[in-house]
Image (cartoon, coloured by chain):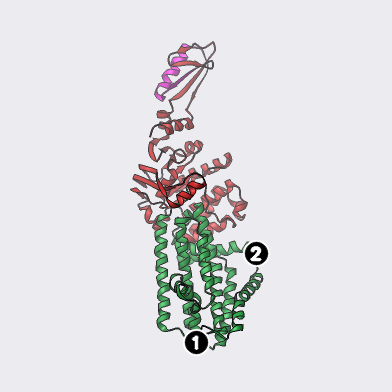
Amino acid sequence: MIQVNALSKVYPVPKRGEGLWGSLRSIFSREVEEVRAVADLSFSIQAGERVGFLGPNGAGKTTTLKMLSGLLVPTSGDRVVAGFDPSKRDPAFLRRITLVMGQKQQLLWDLPPIETFALNRALFGLEEAEAKRTQEELIELLELGPLLTRPVRNLSLGERMKCELAAALLHRPDVLFLDEPTIGLDVRAQVAVRRFIAEWNERSGATVLLTSHYMADIAALCPRVIVIAGGALRYDGPLKDLAERYGGGRKVIVRTRDEAPEQLGPFVREDGALVARLPSAEVTAAVDFALRQVAVADLSIEEPPLEDVLSKLFAERT
Amino acid sequence: MSLGVAVAALTRASLLTTMRYRASFVGEAVMAVAWAAWTAAPLFVVFDQAPTLAGWTAEEALAVIGFFIIAQGALEALVDPNLRAVVEQVRQGTFDFVLLKPLDAQLYVSLHRTEPIKLVHCLVGLAIVAHSARAIDAGAVELASAALLMLAGLTLLHSLWTVVVSSAFFFVKVDNLSWLIRAGLDAGRWPVSLYRGVVRFVLTFVLPIGLVTTYPALALRGELKPSTGLGALVISVLFGMLARVAWIRSLRRYSSASS
């Protein structure tokens, strides 16, 4: 559904001098700096997949999503989305994709959301009966009923985001680009949005490419993740393997009835308990070993926090 | 047809947005008449001193004012609100959503924010033109060619506006440019033949405001040579094409505000 091959984007950014004198000077001699937002990025996504697109701020996530949705022209490389070259902005292409941006909104600010829905139905040239059915479905799934007739400016951030999602999906696109759809939302609204995305993906079979800084979003929604940093690909594969490879393994904690020894096989004593960090494959053997060697009062196995895994990955050399 | 549906929906949304201000038709009409009187006032001062000015009588020059008011009304109702909205969208990056719609973006931004109530100014302008046409006894041919030239003039204004919007993709803040066009249009309240040298050249060919106000008035007087009329039409079509090219080029340059 999405094919990206050696995609790069370089932005020319004017360099400004410091202070008043510097500003004056830059009026006359404009220095332009080239900023490489995306470098040689390649990946492909199958129809119906839910993929998390991760990276630190400024990694090039939004730039990539914009190139995939036809808003930005890449400096080099190619991409095919739903069988189209996005740069051409073919109306048939635009009917098959959608882009939701957590930090920007398309809802008409002074009017109730239902008016944006009506406008979008017309702009996408949707068949009225079918579009109304989709609209009803979205209203029900997102529980928008009471919000529909209130002006957008009177809605809360979470309510607005739910309406944004509905407005962006009325034309039942095959590809959903979701750029931080949960940003700034409270926990309840985050969960609601998350549930909705999963449900919609199940129902419509749409492909989802999602960026988020909330790891709970990614853990709940994306079996596969693509990680970029400094515009370049760092990891592309199953989410669970990411933790395995970069998380320093799972943490086995054994509390003993008697005082724990300083060291025991793979375990060392930390805060009075025996602790070992191991790859998944070695966990069973370690647990077995501990049970045989000491009187175990309590035993737990922890996954490394995704945040830690990612910050380790982001910090690696380019 | 789906294009018609899209245009109707955009117009509806922009009407609804305007209506939240509870704009009063009566209030706007009073304003329009007062504004028209204020605009025409200098004319009476001048014609009080001399019966004709560069070959124009007071009644004829009033037609120029009438066309000027029509153009200004169209600018305030249809062009200016759209311009302000686009500049804001480009600055904030929400112009992305315009480009994500399967409708021609130029058509979209020409329609998505209008203030139809301001069209009352156009009605006042039309009344002034009608009064002037009666006074100079214009026939059907004159009226028809004046109407045609007025449409050409309005098309031209729209093209100029499109060029301004296109430049927004390069410079981001272009409100100043729109003021330049307004200042140019302001010069159009007098017949272009009153101006000399460079100014006249600019008002005829570079920023052809004369085409918007003076030419339709000339047509009303029956003094527009067919060749000049045809030339005016060609210019407005050329500006339309130029605007389209500028628009398409600037879209390629568009790099939306970073997330």
The part of the chain drawn in magenta is A271-295
Q: Observer-nearest residue: A2 or B243?
A: B243
At label 2, which amino acid type do we have? Arg
Chain drawn green in the picture? B
**Height in image: B231 above or below A59?**
below
Q: Is residue B117 left or right of residue A64?
A: right
As helix, strand or loop, the secondary structure at mark 2 comes to: loop
Q: Residues within 10 Å of mark 1 (few under 14, many from 20)?
A: few
Q: Name the spot of residue B251 as percent of width and height, x first.
A: 42, 57
The location of residue A193, given as percent across then percent down, is 53, 44
Q: Amino acid at mark 1?
A: Ala
Q: Are marks 2 and 1 in contact (CB under 8 Å)?
A: no
Picture disc at residue B17: none
Q: Residue under circle 2?
A: B22
SS for callout 1:
helix
Q: Could you tell me residue B50's position as x and y percent?
A: 58, 84
Separation of residues labelled 2 and 1 (CA atoms): 40 Å
**In the rendered image, is residue A21 in sight?**
yes
Q: Nearer the viewer, residue A292 or A239?
A: A239
Q: Please tell me whether residue A284 belongs to the stretch shown in magenta.
A: yes
On the image, the x and y values in percent for residue A156 come to 60, 47
**Is residue A132 in view from this perspective?**
no
Residue B80 is covered by the magenta coloring = no
Please give the residue where the numbered disc 1 appears in the rendered image: B140
Residue found at x 40% / y 71%: B238
Provide the chain ID for the residue under circle 1.
B
Any idea which chain is the red one in this picture?
Answer: A
Position of the N terminus of chain B, as image quadrant, is: bottom left
**How many residues crowd mark 2 within 10 Å: few (<14), some (14–19), many (20+)?**
few
Residue at the (45%, 75%) spot, across then down: B197
The chain that hosts pointer 2 is B
Are labels 2 and 1 assigned to the same chain? yes
